[in-house]
Amino acid sequence: MSKLEVPVSNWSSIDDETTSLILSLLLDDIKHATSSGKGKQVEGTLADIDLAIQLYTEELEKAAMFTSDHRMTKSIQMACQMDSEALIQSEREEQMAHHDHEVSTLIQQQNSEVSETEIDYADPSVAELELLDKLSAIYITGIDDDKTDDEGCVEIANTETAGQPECSSWAASRKSQNVTRKRRCLACDDKTHFTNLARATCGHEYCRDCLGQLFQNAMSDETLFPPRCCRQPIPLDQNLLFLAEDLVRQFRVKAVEFATPQRTYCTRRTCSAFIHPDNCQLGIATCADCGHQTCTTCKGPSHSGDCPHDEDLQKVLEIAKEERWQRCPGCLSMIELETGCFHMTCKCGSEFCYLCSKLWKSCDCRHWDEHRLLNRAEEIENRNHANNRGPYVPPADRRENLGRIMQNLRDHHECDHFNWSTRSGRFRCEECHDFLPNYIFECRQCNILACRRCRFNRF
């Protein structure tokens, strides 16, 4: 083997120090390599051997630079890991100094006493420290080869940081990981390496695909916005590592749309794009996509003078009046009551009374229509017996049983849906109306049926 031939088949298992030494020796060897000087070539060009040496030198220098950067990055990571408590304390002191400076400036400007606001100097959460560990595994130390035993526990290979001291908070964040590096996604139930699992605020974890689907569904169904699990929003900024760049961009645009009350959409049927509030001036909204102008009052094509009578809208309002539909006071969407009490929660988040359209609990309207209440009780009663839920009830006792169900619905008409059970069989979700072939969740208090997605991500 000549000096320039290097076996690289096992380089992935070589540590950084050895790799750096090999590259240094190769660079020293290449400096002494000279061409034979034989051969003919065009004046001003390099011979083939000289060109090969030049290219090989460039590759070695790039590899040496990469190795040096990699060692520096790992060194910074280890320093952050070992000195995390000192870094946290330093950040606290900077926050306190900044706060004291703001208070003192305010006192000088107003020449009055200012009550200092308490600042939360809490330690980083376990989720935040775990995210650092994921970034470390992905970009620095690499993902370990896990060996899973029969019970699902995982044996962790030693990393290069083994034997190094760890701060208490960092160790706490790694405690559960050292037991199970592969965990199950709540949505698909597949076992996934922890670096590919995003942790929601409630503690449940989602794989990359399922998390992306949650954000995608939230953009197409406003009732699922913002993405949430167990009623707690899933922050976008804390999960950028697991979401595609294009999805993040679309989600941020959609977030502005959903946060806008009484939105205006382009009246051009081939466009229908949402018009940002910044593009609405003096009652005229200009579409950024096609340039078409829309009236922000009647939502029709722009016009001069006062907004004319919208005949199509009036026809819809007449039908709504006949069918006893109601309009949301927040976004003016038309709402139809199918089941449940008169407490309505619109997709935009507004809560109002279905009878008078006032904000919820600001009126004296009754909460239930007795006819609807009886229909709902009969539906629950028939569902229970059709699926062999509970003992057979003779016809004479059916009215008494319906009375108990109706009273339970009255007591829990503002149910928080905190207590769930599962029912086996084929059912239809009463929120998204999807059919589930095997099982469904049922609220123990109000008896509403919900699929897995609505159970965790909607309520």
Image (tube, rainbow, N blue to C red):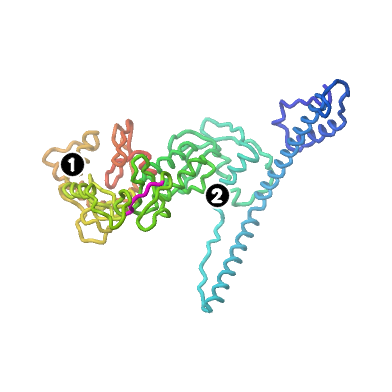
Residue 132's x, y, as percent?
Answer: 59, 46
Look at label 1 and name its amino acid. Glu
Q: Position of residue 120 (x, y in %)?
A: 53, 61
Q: Is residue 294 magenta?
A: yes
Is the residue marked by circle 2 packed among few (<14), some (14-19), or many (20+) residues within 10 Å? Answer: some
Can residue 344 be seen here? yes
Q: Amino acid at mark 2?
A: Glu
Give the CA distance from mark 2 to mark 1.
49 Å
Q: Is residue 285 above or below residue 116?
A: above
Q: Residue, x 23% and y 53% (percent of image)?
A: 309
Chain-order first, disc 2 or disc 1 = 2
Residue 155: % across, % down: 59, 35
Which residue is drawn at the image coordinates 22% and 44% (left, top)? Answer: 338
Q: Nearer the viewer, residue 78 or 289?
A: 289
Q: Residue 280 vs residue 386: left or right? A: right
Q: In the picture provided, is 219 more to the left or to the right than 154?
A: left
Q: Quadrant of residue 146?
A: top right
Q: Which residue is mark 1?
A: 378
Q: Please say if the residues under marks 2 and 1 sit with CB atoms less than 8 Å apart.
A: no
Percent position (x, y) of residue 263?
A: 35, 51
Residue tagged by mark 2? Answer: 128
Q: Which residues are magenta?
A: 291-296
